[in-house]
Amino acid sequence: MANTTSAKKATRKIARRTDVNKARRSRVRGFLRTVEEAISSGDQAAAAAALRAAQPELMRAVGKGVFHANTASRKMSRLSSRVKALNA
């Protein structure tokens, strides 16, 4: 348990940031889920549109420190290759 005033303030700040980061991570996961559903339905146009919508959200999460840059790049790469495979 925090004893000093600064430690108590730090725990309050951490709790607020945790809530913001959870919301951001959840939002990104929703965008990724939309892409996954479009891929599983086999609709290449919808999957490509969902991927274009998901990319800036994922990169925004990287900028805010919610995801690591390599993780986001890996996710985008794998999703885009799956979307391209739908066309073939």
Image (tube, grey):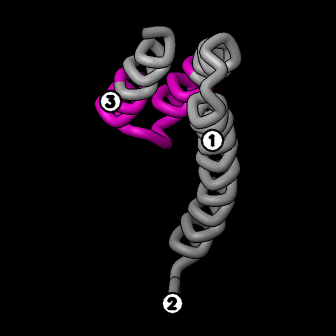
Question: Mark 1 vs mark 3: which is more N-terminal?
Answer: 1
Image-based side of 23 in relation to 88, left or right = right
Q: Which mark is residue 1?
A: 2
Mark 3 Cα-neighbour bin, 10 Å: few <14, some 14–19, many ≥20 = few
Residue 81 in the image: state x and y as whole percent: 38, 19
Q: Is residue 4 above or below residue 48?
A: below
Q: Is residue 73 above or below residue 9?
A: above
| Magenta part of the chain | 55-77
Question: Residue at 60% of width from left, 44% of height from top?
Answer: 29
Residue 3 in the image: state x and y as whole percent: 52, 86
Q: Nearer the viewer, residue 40 or 73?
A: 40
Question: Residue at 61% of width from left, 15% of height from top?
Answer: 44
**Considering the numbered disc 1 on the image, is that residue within a helix, a strand or a loop?**
helix
Q: Nearer the viewer, residue 53 or 42?
A: 42
Residue type beneath disc 1: Arg
Question: Mark 2 vs mark 3: which is more N-terminal?
Answer: 2
